[in-house]
Image: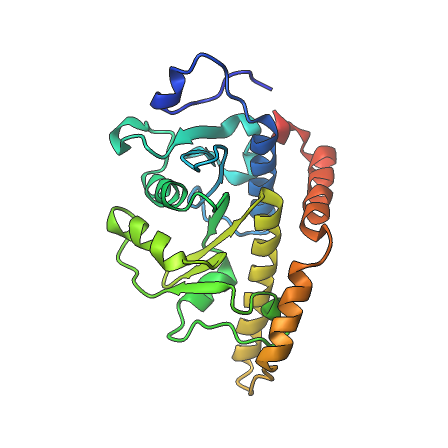
Amino acid sequence: MDDKIALSPNMENQSCAISFEQERIDLAAALRWAARNNWHEAIANHFSFAVSGDGSQFIMNSYGRHWSKMRASDVLVLDANDEPDTIGDKVDPTAWAIHSAMHRNLPHVRCILHVHSKYATALSCLKDPEMPPIDQNTMRFFNRVAIDFGFDGMGLEGEAERLTTTMGNKSILLMGNHGVMVTGETIAQAYDDLYYFERACETLITALSSGRELNVVSDEIADKTMRQWMEYPNFAEKHFAALKDILDEEEPEYRS
């Protein structure tokens, strides 16, 4: 592991080295698995994780590195209070606008995973992008999804600030005409939710494509199932640990 990594200008002047080694390893693992699941879009989209209590300091994948090749040393440490013209060419401008605004304005949101995955994006393009509870996976997200209907371009300027208010107290933001943003207290939790949200979207889009009527369960059953998911012991941590075990065997360089 390299001792030094790219820091924002505000952080370069700090006297002690900042590594956040385990967090960078976990973010690299999440990015590699997202590529394996075909959730990536060329070199676009970004994952980030807050490493300071107020959320202003966060780590994020560097611009131009393909997710399938991401290493811990490719993960940047950034400061959401930096001026946009000081961040350099290793940071994607759209990613900076969205993720810095989210971390600056919503300090309780620790991990942010944004993708244009196939089925979540397809759902975001529907006139009615609500997710009715039709199976265990769609029920997992009952009353947990905020929907943004104000798409106004590529996520720069006012677009990024608006998303922070649209999120509200939800953990998932379906970004109309755009994609999805999943948040969580840990990288493992956010990744697990992203995995199941894309699976839920796949089931819904497939069921809708049949042209037949959906069998939607009651709000009571949907809420019960959602809470069972939320209370399931250590599921996300065990899921993510299993994924890292595979990478440790097949692509151990992700840790470097």
Image point (60%, 84%), residue name? 215
Q: Is residue 49 visible?
A: yes
Residue 59's spot in the image, x, y percent?
47, 33
Residue 242's spot in the image, x, y percent?
73, 44
Image point (57%, 77%), residue name? 207
Image point (56%, 82%), residue name? 210
Residue 245's spot in the image, x, y percent?
74, 38
Quarter of the image with the N terminus is top right
Up the image or down, 256 lies above or below 121; here it is above
Identity of the residue furthest to the bottom in this view? 213
Q: Residue 249 lies in what quarter of the image?
A: top right
Residue 159 as seen in the image, left or right of residue 46: left
Up the image or down, 68 lies above or below 206; here it is above
Q: Is residue 136 visible?
A: no
Frontmost residue, 30 versus 249: 30
Frontmost residue, 237 versus 47: 237
Q: Residue 140 lies in what quarter of the image?
A: bottom right
Quarter of the image with the C terminus is top right
Residue 23's spot in the image, x, y percent?
58, 33
